[in-house]
Structures are given as structure tokens and as C-alpha cells.
Amino acid sequence: MKRTPVGPEDFRGVIAVPPLPRHDDPSRTPNFGEADRLVRHLNAAGITRFMFGGNAFFYHVTLHDYAAALDWMTGLPDDWWVLPSAGPSYGRLMDQASLLRARRFPAVMLLPCADPRDAAGLGRGIREFAEASATPVILYLKAEDTLGPDRQQGVELAGRLLEEGICVGIKYAVVREDPRVDPYLERLLSRVDRSRVASGIGERPAVVHLQRWGLPGYTTGSGCVAPTLTQRLYCLAMEGLWDKAEAVREKFLVLEDLRDAWNPAKVLHHAVSLSGVAETGPLCPFLSALDPEQLERVGMAARNLADES
């Protein structure tokens, strides 16, 4: 696992956000053998950046399994950028802080909290967590009010945390009907360095986020099924071949539509198994499995996408 400080170059490219496979038994503990199989499948396509968060159900992981997952991550190759997530509540962050401090990750992504919060309080809590964990953070902006109900105060908080070095990057994942029109992203990029902001919603808005907004890279879930294809999308974009990049992006939309319809993380968890990439095992509570008809549709979409890669 790469331990050098996170810099702007780390956000240039494709960042995988994989599921975390689990054993198919009553314990449902992480299956690190299959997790290895998954990340090495991604790496075979040239992907060396990984973040484990919502798709890995880190919202629901026990502290015991969290520690085990951190240990597995630290054992991955030295040139791989491998980051866990933490939170989302303040208490959860502080419980996880000592586990992170002992393992010296270059950064940790903060899962977005939906509980009562405001920018001033979040700022205090994030600073306390960063000090306790000795780990800089990546903010995960999933909605305009992720950093509190006052949007401008939230943007200002993000800017100050970046200036202080407490935050080293932002995963931007606010969904828009038309990603070309995004006043909140425009406001954010007027306050922070765009080289530290990754598009965080997969392939659907990736081309627009790279071309229109100048973001340096994007996260991918569906790319776990077709890593070579998502790498091709990024390379075409970097060459300025936007029409060709758009044609590649469209190949992801069948699976992305199913993810949006039935829960992105749940569908990806099944898609990785059904495509034959790795056995992800059961979902953890609080999610139920897809029904047989849904599984058939997801399997077909995942296998078709994998065949394109």
C-alpha cells in the first residue's frame, strides 16, 4: 500500500470503488481471498487507485471487521493507492480513529452523515478526528447539504480544510439531471483547487465532469466489471477524443440504469459475482438481495459489459 502523502496527481485517472466480498455463512465476515481476486482483476487493467466506502458497505461494518479490512489493505502492493472510509457519525469516527492511527494510511474518506449537523460543528468534529487518527481526510460530497444546510458555509469549510491540509481531496457525487448545469459544483470549484476534486458518480457524468468542469479523474463502480473499458474511456478523454469517450460511456448505461433503479451498491455487489469477476457473497444487513428476475437482468447487463472490456 502506498503511504506517501496524497497529492493532485493521485486524482488524475480512474479510482475504483469496489464492493467488499463476504463469506457465505452466518458470520458474513469479509472474504479477503475474493477481495484479492477482485482488486487484482482491476489492476490487470492498469488501475492502481482504490477507495472502499459505500459500495463496500463500510457504513455497516463492525469494528472487528473494519480492523481486519484495514490490515488487508495495508498488505496490498506498495505502488497501490488504497484508502478506506470512516464514519459517518462522530462517535463512529472517533471509535475508528485509533485503528487508523496505528496503520498510517495516507488518507481516509469520510462517509457523508445524514444526522443533524452544520458546517461549524462538522469542522470541529473533522479536525478532532484528523488529529486523533493522524490521518488526513477526503470529503465525500453526496448532496449539497453534506457539509450542513448552509451551502456557502459548507463550501467555505471545504476550502479551509484543504488549506489547512486536514483535507487532501473531495469526491464530488451530487447527482444532476444534466451534469453540465451545476451551480453548486461551480461554487465549489471557485473556492477549491479542481485538481483535488474527483468526479464521484461513476461513468454516467464522467465525460461531462472531465470536459466541462475540468475534473482530473473519476471513481468507478461498474468499472469493477469492465476495468479495461473504463480505462479506455479515461484515455480517450485525455486525448480530447470526446465523441469516442462518449461512445464508450454509453456502454455502461444499461448496468448504471439498473444500479440507479435498485440501489447502486446492491446491484454492483451482485454484478461482480454474476459477471464472474469475484464471488462477493451475501449482502450485509440492512439490505436484502435482489429477486430472481432482477438478478437475471443484472447478470445479463454485467456479462454484456464484461464482454466489451
Image (cartoon, rainbow, N blue to C red):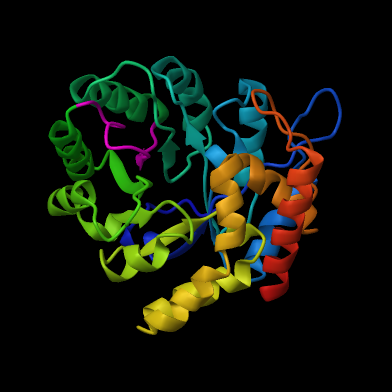
Q: Residue at x 56, y 53 (%)?
A: 257
Instruction: Establish if 10 lies above or below 144.
Output: below
Q: Residue at x 68, y 24 (%)?
A: 285
Magenta highlight on residue 135? yes
- Report whether residue 36 is seen: no
Q: In which quarter of the image is residue 211?
A: bottom left
Instruction: Establish if 246 lies above or below 11.
Output: below
- Image coordinates of residue 2 in percent, x first then y, are 51, 55
Q: Which of 307 and 261 is in front in this view?
A: 261
Q: Which of 103 and 6 is in front in this view?
A: 6
- Image coordinates of residue 143 in percent, x first then y, are 33, 37
- Report whether residue 155 is seen: yes
Q: How many labels does the image show?
A: 0
Q: Quadrant of residue 43?
A: bottom right
Residue sticking out furthest to the front: 293
Q: In which quarter of the image is residue 193?
A: bottom left
- Image coordinates of residue 67 in percent, x first then y, are 62, 29
Q: Nearer the viewer, residue 230 or 108?
A: 230
Boundaries of the magenta span: 134-149
Q: Which residue is drawn at 64% across and 23% down?
A: 286
User: Mostly what secondary structure, the magenta segment?
Assistant: loop
Q: Residue at x 53, y 77 (%)?
A: 232
Q: Is residue 43 left or right of residue 6?
A: right
- Image coordinates of residue 35 in percent, x first then y, are 72, 48
Q: In this view, does 23 lie to the left or right of 269?
A: right
**Quadrant including the C terminus:** bottom right
Magenta highlight on residue 83? no
